[in-house]
Image (cartoon, helix red, strand yellow):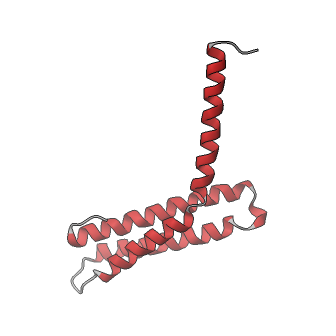
Amino acid sequence: MLKGKNLILALALAGFGFAAVGTTSAMAYSCGAEYEAAEKLISEAKSMVKADTDSRILAMITEAEGIADAGIISHKKANQPHTGDNGKFMHGDSVRKGRWARSLANQAIFLMNGETR
């Protein structure tokens, strides 16, 4: 039987474990929101491109598009029934790629007009 500090420690660890499991599964399926935000920023960055835009900024926008597409592919593969535990990793990977694409598009917008989104 647990007493005193051991009981508090056990309850704290159990609470932390339940919180970690709940938040990771919720974050794993937020791929759609990440890609919508990334696509919005990428289209906004593309609309700001002018004839004299630096080629490095254009490359950054192109890279953001490629990373977003790779993340969407990873998300689709994660939803296939045969992936099992690997599917959880692929969902996390697709979320990371969505955030990375969003970050690159945000950097491109900042470099073109000095504003962040």
Which residue is located at x 38 percent, y 63 percent? 103
Give x and y (percent) for residue 16: 60, 34
Instruction: Write down the quadrant of residue 5 in the picture.
Output: top right
- Quadrant hosting residue 88: bottom right
Residue 61 lies in quadrant: bottom left
Q: Position of residue 49 (x, y in %)?
A: 28, 82
Q: Residue 80 in the image: x percent, y percent?
A: 73, 68
In the drawing, does residue 98 fall left or right of residue 90? left
Horizontal relation, residue 1 to residue 73: left or right? right
Q: Where is residue 72? Give x, y as percent.
A: 57, 71
Q: Residue at x 60, y 27 (%)?
A: 12
Between residues 61 and 95, which one lies in front from this camera angle?
95
On screen, residue 104 versus residue 81, left or right, reads left
Front-lying residue, 54 or 4: 4
Q: Does residue 69 sit above or below 81 in this rendering?
A: below
Most foreground residue, 18 or 108: 18
Q: Residue at x 46, y 61 (%)?
A: 99
